[in-house]
Image: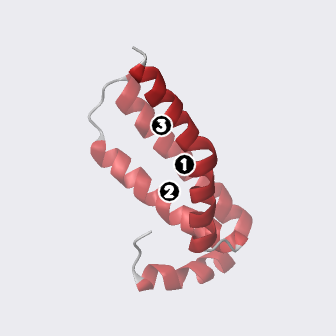
Amino acid sequence: MLMTDATRNSMPDMIEMRGKNKIILIAVEEMSELIKALLKNINRGKDNREDILMELTDVSMFLEYVKMIYGFKDEEIRDYQDKVTHEKVMPKIEAWKKSQLQH
């Protein structure tokens, strides 16, 4: 995630101050708020791009906290994303493309 040095440098202190469990609960709460904003957009047709941006920013930041708490490195996450893409996503896309050719 794009993050200023000041924000990144403050994260260990925030984790120590609030505690790991509290930070994780806040991350879950922020994800819930993003879900609500997305559902308002989809289900109610609400033009709430600003709300989605705000919640997406909060979730992105708290995902960085979660990564720090559990010791996940960006490279480890990238490698796993690549594995999931090749093992799960690409076969689904290929099957969909094949079905589109048959119609």
Q: Nearer the viewer, residue 91 or 22?
A: 91
Q: Earlier in the sequence, mark 3 or mark 1?
A: 1
Q: Nearer the viewer, residue 34 or 14?
A: 34
| Quadrant of the rendered image containing residue 76 | bottom right
Q: Earlier in the sequence, mark 1 or mark 2?
A: 1
Residue carrying label 2 = 59
Q: Residues within 10 Å of mark 2 (few under 14, many from 20)?
A: many
Q: Is residue 18 visible?
A: no
* Residue type highlighted by circle 3: Lys
Q: Position of residue 35 (x, y in %)?
A: 50, 39
What is the distance, in whole Å, between disc 3 and disc 1 at their CAs? Answer: 9 Å
Q: Secondary structure at mark 2?
A: helix
Q: For the point 49% across and 44% down, which residue is it?
A: 33
Q: Above or below — where is 11 with respect to 66?
A: below
What is the distance, in whole Å, between disc 1 and disc 2 at their CAs? Answer: 6 Å
Residue carrying label 1 = 31
Q: Secondary structure at mark 3?
A: helix
Q: Earlier in the sequence, mark 2 or mark 3?
A: 3
Q: Position of residue 36 (x, y in %)?
A: 47, 37
Residue carrying label 3 = 36
Q: For the point 63% across and 65% down, which residue is it?
A: 66
* Residue type highlighted by circle 1: Met
Q: Residues within 10 Å of mark 1 (few under 14, many from 20)?
A: some
